[in-house]
Each structure stands twice: as C-alpha cells, then as structure tokens.
Amino acid sequence: MSRPRVKITLIDRKGPVGCHRGHQVGDSWDFDTQRGEICPMAMHVAFPYVDILRYGGEIPQRALVQEVLGQEAHWGQSLCEVPGLVERVDLCLTRIREQGLRAADDGVFGLPGQVAVIEVEDVVVAHALLYGLALIGGSYGPLLPGGEWALLTRNGPFFSLLFVALGAELRLRGWQPDARCSALLMVAGMVLYALEAEGLLHFAAVPLNRHDFLLGSLPWALGLFGLLLANPNWGRGSWLERQAPKVLGLYCLHMMLVVWLMVFGPQGKLLWWELVKVPVLLVLSLLACRLLATNRISGWLLRAR
C-alpha cells in the first residue's frame, strides 16, 4: 500500500513572540522531502498525527472538525465563538494538568484513554537527585568524608538527564523566555559557578580545571538557552551557522584532539597557551572534520556535508 503524501501548512501564530526557526504563517512543507526544515518542536507535536494519516487512519479530532465545518453558520467565526469548543478544550487541558500527560479519556476528543505517561515533574526530581549525587561524588567529594568516588560521575546519566528533563518541562509549560531575564539568569549562574570553584579551591584544594558541572551550571545553561530562544535570528547567515552540519563531527573528534594537545602542546601553566588553546582546538577540529568528510564512509558517519 502506497503511503499518502502529507503536506504541513502553518496557519496561525498563538503568541506575540515569533517562531525561533523563523517560520511564517502560510509556510508549507512536504513531509517526505522537507520535514528536516520544520521546527523540531512543531514536528514533535505533528508527527503522531502525520503517522496516523500515512497509514490510513483517522485523526481523533476529525469528527469535531467535521462537526464545526459542517455547519455553515460557523464558517465566519473564530474558534473561540464555536459553541462548546472552548469548554471541551478546557476540559482536556484540565485533565492533562491534573493527571499528567495521557490521553484525555471519556470522549473529550474521542481519544482512547489507554496511554499512561509518567509525570514530567517526577522525572525532574529524580534527575535532580542524580545531579546531586554526581556533585557529591565529583567536585564536592574532597569536602566530604571518603573523598571522590571511584565511579566517574562526569558521564552517563548523572548530569545530562536533568537538563533533558528540564527542557521537556519548559516545553510543556510553553516557556517563552524574556531576553533580559535570561541574560540575568545566565550571569547569575556564571557568578555562582565562579564562587563555587573558588570556594572549592580555597577549602578543599580542588583545581579550577577539575570541574565539569557545579550548581551554577544549571542557571547558567538555562539562561543561555532562554537568551538564544528569545533572539532566534542571532547568527543567521553567519559563518557560525554554516558550521552547523559539522556539529556531530566536531563533538566526536574534539576529545581526541584535546588529548593530543595535552601530550604534544606546551607543558606547564602558560597564560598565552591557556588563551589560545580553545581557538586552536576549534580550528583543528574543523580541519579534521573537513578531511574526514572527503571519505564517503566517514563523511556519512559524521553527517558532514
């Protein structure tokens, strides 16, 4: 059975802040050939419905849509003026708030109430505990009895999952960050990080370059993320944007080059080397990525183009 072609069209904007991907009302995309151009957050919402259509199914809300469109009296109205529609949407959202993300059953939109999903807040709390354990076993270890753990908490689920869970929670809450507040949050996070690092150096002799994440990393990251979301056009058309396809390659290659620089670079605490080390690492990573992109297999693995 051939799958039907699906066309996605942006028909409305729900808030005063423009799309961070620059999409405009009226933009259209062919799902099969252009879905990579669509905002990932929009695709996350649209994909379940696209999949239903592609396999010959019916969108659960279609009956409601047909009910509205089938009455000529509604054609000139806004959605808010359609009798019963706002109440049904409010009921659905209330159940989602009270019972977590699961299908709104009892026929609110004709969805089967069979899918249970863990509350995102519970996931955030669990991952916050992992983050705290990682700090205790890592940078804060020398302050506590027993010192640092033998288990390396830098990698794995300890630090990373909290940022993923926070991102999901902010997405569900429809976070629309303010640029000024985000900048202040980022600066506050940087200051907190610096104070933590200085305190650990003074009281526990933990070197400044020992830290991967501290408590200040959270507001620092959230502030930076919010600042970028509030300014979606930053960097558009710049050299930096053109390097975006190389991100996977740069990430995979940079650690090997870091080790090489540590082994073959200048030894000792040299101020000039500390200043140029990061730019040198970036240039070497870009050159290595470009070189590997010339080979079909390595270029495909690194998604370079």
Image (tube, rainbow, N blue to C red):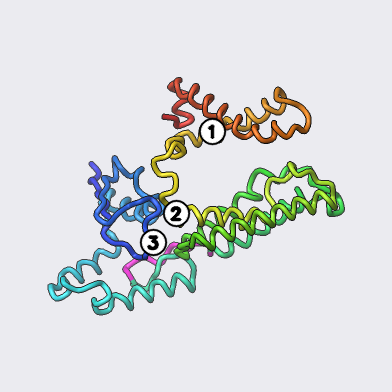
Tag of residue 231:
2
Q: Furthest-right residue in view? A: 145
Tag of residue 236:
none
Say what secondary structure mark 1 lies in: helix
What is the magenta range? Answer: 109-119
- Mark 2 or mark 1, whichever is nearer to me: 2
At 68% from the left and 28% from the top, the residue drawn is 259
Residue 75, x across and y down, in percent: 16, 71
Foreground residue among 193 and 139: 193
At 33% from the left and 75% from the top, the residue drawn is 88
State whether residue 225 is above or below residue 285: below
At 41% from the left and 65% from the top, the residue drawn is 103
State whether residue 75 is above or below residue 243: below
Sequence-wise first label, 3 or 2: 3
Magenta stretch, main secondary structure class: loop
Q: Which residue is mark 3?
A: 17
Q: Is residue 118 magenta?
A: yes
Describe residue 200's horizontal placement relative to residue 186 as left or right: right
At 15% from the left and 73% from the top, the residue drawn is 71
Tag of residue 250:
1
Sequence-wise first label, 2 or 1: 2
Foreground residue among 149 and 11: 11
Q: Residues within 10 Å of mark 3 (few under 14, many from 20)?
A: few
Describe residue 182's horizontal placement relative to residue 110 as left or right: right
- Label 2, label 1: how many angstroms apart (C-alpha)? 25 Å
Q: Furthest-front residue in view? A: 272
Q: Are marks 3 and 1 in contact (CB under 8 Å)?
A: no
Q: Residues within 10 Å of mark 1 (few under 14, many from 20)?
A: many
State whether residue 278 is above or below residue 67: above
**Could you tell me the amino acid type at mark 3?**
Val
